[in-house]
Image: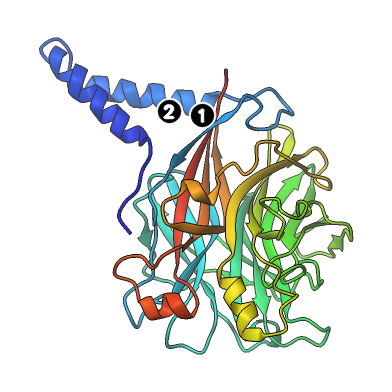
Amino acid sequence: MPFQQKGDYSELLVNWSNNNVYNIMNKYNVLIIAGILVLVCTSCITSVKPEPNTPFFAKGLKHTLGPNPALVPGDLGSWDDRVLESGDCFKDGDTYYWFYHAHSSWDKVSYQIGVATSGSPLGPWNKYEGNPILKVSEKSHETYCVACPMVVKDGDKYYMIYLSAGDSPVGWGWSVSLASADHPLGPWTKSDKNPILVHQHMGYPGGLVKVKDKWYMFGTEPSEVHPDYGRMYVATADILEGPWEVREEPALSEGPRGSWDEGTFSEFEVQYFNGLFHAFYGGSQFPEIKDSTDRKEARKKRLRVREGIGYAYSEDGYNFTKYEGNPVVPYQEVPNCAAMAEVHFLIEYPRIYCYHTLRYLESPDEENEAWFEQSWVEHLGTQVLEDKLE
């Protein structure tokens, strides 16, 4: 799929330079001017904050297409040559780390976890040569897959929670596990207390935040409403290893029948910023699947899922309010997009960068059309949202 962009900020800076800088070259040093521009732009982005306890987009928002696709599967025969699905994007120092899970067309193992790095929130992204950084193991709780990575830094240590799936004596095959590292690229060491949380509600972890010495973990229950889609739940603990207390009531539920998010959520992320919990999530709209008695028909309906990006906020982390202007990114605004799933985000206020799995309406160029017809093609995509301050 060709590079798509609607309002590229770097292009605006280049255009300004072409029209103005060279007209005054005899008077000023171009490098000095460029440095000033960078400092000014950086200051504007990092020093501005909304009023405390204020939701994003109180005065509206601007949506800009990021590079789509931003990451694609590797060459045939590589560990990630089939599909990529988004995990957390994490900034440490001057480097951005985009974690994702993927699987291959040849290995019987399902998803494993990799990472790509960049010096910019919009790439270009370079896959780490040591991928996959987290693999399945022979332990019963993760023989099938490891996926949905979410990374935080606490003190001098980096922690990752992730979906672990395998055999389970409790009636479902998923759990949440923990790994730690001294660097975002690893090596990552799995906790000897894994899995740290086994609960039906917490299958696809999407958020991990620490507020006033309490840990909040957010996740969706797989296939609670439709295959792969469920409501958002929250669990709390004093330490990452647990014990975790899961709240039985959902923190966020689907919209009414016929709404853009009637089919609940694929995945999301929650962050705590400026006095509020903020969530960006993939909300789905697609035909009733559970009503289908024919498995083939149900599968066809599942492949036609339509999914945009929504925003919600909370004061306590237990009860979220949806933004009245949702979806903040309708799938119709992204060329050839059927769904933006597994949504994560990064705040560089007033801009919010959304990272997601990208599925297509039509098979993109240079992709295997048979794969697209049989299931779908999944790449990684980005969107930019900007909070209007006036």
- Judged from the image, the secondary structure of the residue bearing numbered disc 2 is helix
What residue is shown at x 63% (from left), y 31% (from top)? 57
- Crowding at dot 2, Cα within 10 Å, few <14 / some 14-19 / many 20+, comes out as few
Per the rendering, the mark at residue 105 is none
Q: Which residue is mark 2?
A: 42
Residue sitting at the far top: 27
Q: Amino acid at mark 2?
A: Thr
Q: Are marks 1 and 2 in contact (CB under 8 Å)?
A: yes
Q: Quadrant of the N terminus?
A: bottom left
Nearest to the observer: residue 267 or residue 50 = 267
Residue displayed at 43% across by 43% down:
65
Residue matched to label 1: 46
- Residue 275: x %, y % from top left: 74, 33
Residue at 22% in and 24% down: 17
Is residue 141 depicted above or below 387 in this figure? below
Quarter location, residue 10: top left
